[in-house]
Image: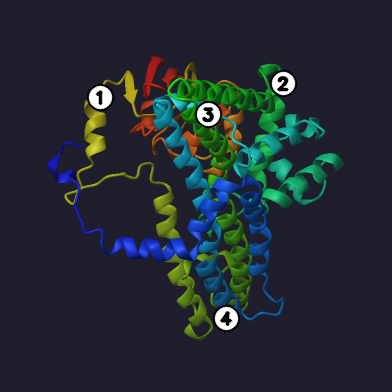
Amino acid sequence: MADPRLSVTRTARRPVVPAAARFARRIHAPARVLQALASPRRSYAHVSGLGERIDRRLRVPAGATPAQRLDHAERVLAGTFPLVVSVMPIVITGYALFALAARLSGVPLAEMQDVLRSLPANPTTEMDLQLWALAGRVEPEPFRELPVDELARRYRDGALPPKAQREIAGFLDRYGHRGVAEIDLGLPRWSEDPTHILGVLANYLRAGVAAGPPPDALFARGAADAEAAVAAVVARARRRGRLRGAVTRFALSRTRAYGGLRELPKFHLVQTLAGLRRSMLAVGEHLVATGVLAEPHDVFFLTFAEARAAPAGGDLRERVAGRRAAHERETRRRHVPRIMLSDGTEPEAQAAVTADPGALTGSAASAGTVTGPARVVLDPVGAHLEPGEILVCPSTDPGWTPLFLTAGGLVMEMGGAMSHGAVVAREYGIPAVVGVADATHRIVTGARITVDGAAGTVTLTEG
């Protein structure tokens, strides 16, 4: 970052401040902050009703025309973002109080990460733990014996054993709007294609309980460790004054109450996208029937304006075919630069070339040290991760997190200390290093590596 071509460009703050103030008023940020300070119960009451409000916004009359569906989708997209972001003033209050506790106690933030272990009210960790619990309730035989594609076929045909069929349907009723790369409207949800979830269940059942403490026990242990960490920070603050100790305890109690809610805006945003996806597929079916498109999913290769004009615009199949080919070509790209200069130079690639091949460095994300075999995963769908293996991947989103329950550690090419994978790894107590350039190329599956989550290093010890 010392390269002068990467120096920071300074701009005036004057245009930003009024816009930020207007947006803060729109989502009632001052009131939400005061509410968060005064009453977790009232704050939870606000967030608990968001799902139902979004469901009401997503309702479209059964006889709606394609044009009406497109108009509705644009209105919902414009109006839902402020609604789901209204959670963030509550979350930011929790993390601001976390910083205040560090200042009052004199404990560096880096030494307080255990306070953030096993946070309650996080929809992503709740989802993972419910999926693990589900694995303990279903009939295990088909999951241990059949390939994932066959499990998916039987589920769609209603031919899994009765309890498994019922339990998986209940899980998908709650979480079926989620998926891998779920913010892409064009990709299927788990409710459409449950192959990934069935594969994860198969992994859990093949791993068995003998591999170590179950994730729910580890999560409970993490909560106990967090409470111990809170007590230690409060004790440090109290030595500097009784009032400091009291304020620090209050601050950290709010941090733990609200920290897990940071995943809620995306949870509801994806809920919105899943509803709009269903509506857009209905538009796609209409365009197939009128000869504009070859298949309903092709609608996602059109803009709203093109879809609206499509019935009068003739055959768009050739245009969509070109865009689909470009999309498929890009999905085969193994590497996307995080930083690129105008002349095509990628600074990180230059640094990787000169680095010691036996030592990889990144950002410290979750403290702890673990040594074990690496498992390089580029796509979580169908991925198999043995208990204790270290997950090496480009990046993660909530669709990846079921794999975290059996991972011994995490190495990610992308992201920083507050990226999704880093935050979830801390909650689960998994050592993690993120922002490791070219990790999925420089590490191979089966290589034995040591991950030091506090130092931000990954060492190849064998292979």
- Counting residues from the start of the chain, the first of labels 1 and 2 encountered is 2
- List the residue tagged with mark 4: 67
Residue extending farthest right = 162
The colour mode here is rainbow
Q: Residue at x 71, y 38 (%)?
A: 130
Residue 442 % position (x, y): 36, 27
CA separation in Å, label 4 and label 2: 53 Å
Q: Is residue 156 left or right of residue 417?
A: right
Query: Quick one: label 3, few (<14), some, or many (20+) residues within 10 Å?
Result: many
- Counting residues from the start of the chain, the first of labels 3 and 2 encountered is 3
Residues at circles 4 and 3 in contact by the CB criterion of under 8 Å: no
- List the residue tagged with mark 3: 115
- Counting residues from the start of the chain, the first of labels 4 and 2 encountered is 4
CA separation in Å, label 1 and label 2: 40 Å
- List the residue tagged with mark 2: 209
For badge 4, the amino acid type reads Ala
Q: Is disc 1 placed on a helix, strand or loop?
A: loop
Residue 188 % position (x, y): 59, 55
Q: Is residue 408 above or below residue 91?
A: above
- Counting residues from the start of the chain, the first of labels 1 and 4 encountered is 4
- List the residue tagged with mark 1: 355
Indicate the quadrant where residue 459 lies: top left
Residue extending farthest bottom = 312
Q: Is disc 4 placed on a helix, strand or loop?
A: helix
Query: Quick one: label 1, few (<14), some, or many (20+) residues within 10 Å?
Result: few
